[in-house]
Image (tube, helix red, strand yellow):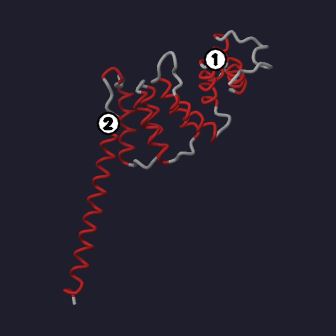
Amino acid sequence: MMRRFAPALAVIAIMIGIGTAIFLWAEARQQASIDRIAELPPELRPKTPSEKQLLKSWLDAVKANPADAHGWNNLASVLFNLGAYGQAEQAYQKSLQIDDAQADIWSLMGESRVRQGKQNDPVSVTAMFAFNQALRLDPQNLRAHFYISLADFNDGKRNRAIDRMRYVADAGASDSMAQRAAQQTLKEWNAGPDDAETGSDRM
């Protein structure tokens, strides 16, 4: 009786072996991608014991549970604060692959792309895509509005940029970082109280 089923059992055993091999290969690849994210140049490596511990703890967390978007977000935040904007972007991308409905993470990934951009044109096409995704999910996302305003100003759309930046300045919580940044930017643009309210920009 067993001889009759022997070929089928052999096929099942082979399939199980292949499935296990694929799983182990995928897991090894995931671990390798995490290790690459953690490869920081000397000037960006954590300097203090607390920074080192924080980076290690969140690296360990995403290695233990790579399907946890929250863990990737925290790792990205640590990397961003170290100035490792490219690695932070990769971590945010990992998070968004798990849950792409995080408006704030889209805008943070956009900001990480801005920090890597050219000084004369920092808001790249890929950064704009991230900011627009953030606004699609949350039309009041101030970070996205702030950077899109900068892009409009660089494109010569002064009135539109001022309107949007004034929205950030007015909508931000009192004395918040967003409000202060927007107010400072408006000063740098010499935007008076009458600017942009009735003006328009050509497309």
Query: Which type of secondary structure does the marked residue at label 2 adopt?
Result: helix
Q: Mark 1 or mark 2: which comes first in sequence?
A: 2
| Residue that extends furthest to the front in the rendered view of this protein | 203
On the rendered structure, is 195 left or right of 28? right
Q: Amino acid at mark 2?
A: Arg
On the rendered structure, is 174 left or right of 155? right
Would you identify the image quadrant in which residue 16 lies? bottom left
Identify the residue position indicated by label 1 in the image.
Answer: 156
| Residue that extends furthest to the left in the rendered view of this protein | 3
111, above or below 1, in the image? above
Are dots 1 and 2 in contact, CB under 8 Å?
Answer: no
Circle 2 residues within 10 Å: few <14, some 14–19, many ≥20:
few
15, above or below 77, in the image? below
Q: Amino acid at mark 1?
A: Gly
On the rendered structure, is 165 left or right of 81? right
Closer to viewer: mark 1 or mark 2 = 1
x 32%, y 52%: residue: 26
Observer-nearest of 94 and 195:
195
Circle 1 residues within 10 Å: few <14, some 14–19, many ≥20:
few
x 33%, y 28%: residue: 40
Q: Position of residue 36 (x, y in %)?
A: 32, 36
126, above or below 97, in the image? above
What distance separates the C-alpha of mark 1 from that of mark 2? 39 Å
Q: Position of residue 10 (x, y in %)?
A: 22, 75
x 63%, y 40%: residue: 136
Observer-nearest of 187 and 151:
151
Query: Which type of secondary structure does the marked residue at label 1 adopt?
Result: loop
Identify the residue position indicated by label 2 in the image.
Answer: 36
